[in-house]
Amino acid sequence: MTTRFTFEIHATDGAARTGAITMQRGEIRTPAFMPVGTAATVKAMKPADVRATGADIILGNTYHLMLRPGAERLARLGGLHGFMGWDRPILTDSGGYQVMSLSALTKLSEEGVAFASHLDGSRHMLSPERSIEIQRLLGSDIVMAFDECTKNGVDRDEAARSMERSMRWAKRSRDAFDAGGEHAGRAALFGIQQGALDEDLRLHSAEALIEIGFDGYAVGGLAVGEGQEAMFATLDFAPGQLPADKPRYLMGVGKPDDIVGAVERGIDMFDCVLPTRSGRNGQAFTRNGPLNIRNAKFAEDQQPVDPACACPVCAGWSRAYLHHLVRSGEILGAMLMTEHNLFFYQALMADLRAAIGEGRLATFAANFRSHYATQRQQA
Ligand SMILES: [Zn+2]
């Protein structure tokens, strides 16, 4: 008899925690970073290489997959895991965020969101019930409730209306998930806290979600343009409003220094396109801050991207070679930059887990920030 979903906390340090989620497809060490596999691929990376960076779980995007290749087609093909060749856990988002940011002619109602595909203009509907159905068809391990990501900068009344609708949708998501038969018996469902930057709204949202009951809780509606200071100010209270014995997931975050600050504030899970997307654009993450490999100063630099990095890219090739590949538009440039960046992110998570486990997170974080900021000012 295998466990459906357990979360065990092995150590705490201040508000930070380290532990593990256990699911049928494998263990997820926390704090965890989930590489984003938008279109059934972590771009420029084979699944075995994603795993070799240290990833225990990846994220798939409901919005993109429902449009292409299509959820019903993916189900006929046996689901997302077999299709893409990743046999470990996959978390799928609900599509709520992408539908509002990528598609056209969106019409929001109590039922859900009607929209036109950004690919071919075809008309679709996403509702809590349809989002959960799609995530089930994909074979998702961690399913996200369908919500409305409240836009940055709206007034309190609008933020409250938006949050309250998301809480009604969270209940419908729970009911749809529970009606999912065999899938509900092996997958997990996470609720998403909204309420913008407002402490009272965040508390109301947390209470509504706890009343419904979820396996984990996401802090949604951050990293939408509010800036790191406002995000950290919200994270000073939002994670503490959510159950301490369940994983807390900060959606869409972030830069390495965002992750360190959020872990210090009690977050257990992250996802972000930054290491993959910015890698393809020539940005490499290092312990001394990000660098732009296209910069002419790297043309004859024979050091590895990050001399302190243990990844195969840094072991095998120089900044000069990556500079050449990226400037030449070579496919290998995107591949190597992505691999290094994902490895850097996973090494950071491993360092955070070790620091929490040994009760030295404050020292680690201060040391990280002093090095990470220095180079960024030079760049
Ligand atoms: Zn490296």
Image (spheres, helix red, strand yellow):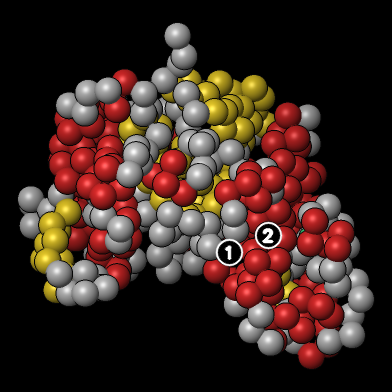
- Ligand 1 under 8 Å from disc 2 Cβ: yes
Return the residue at label 2: 339
Residue type indicated by callout 1 = Ala
* Quadrant of the image where one finds ligand 1: bottom right
Q: Secondary structure at mark 2?
A: helix
Residue type indicated by callout 2 = Glu
User: In the current view of this chain or complex, which residue is farthest to the front?
Assistant: 77
**Residue drawn at point x = 46 percent, y = 49 percent:** 84
Return the residue at label 1: 44
Q: Nearer the viewer, residue 1 or 14?
A: 1
Quarter holding the C terminus is bottom right
Left or right: 177 as drawn, with respect to 231: left
Q: Secondary structure at mark 1?
A: loop
Q: Is residue 247 visible?
A: yes
Quarter holding the N terminus is top left
| Circle 1/circle 2 CB separation < 8 Å | yes
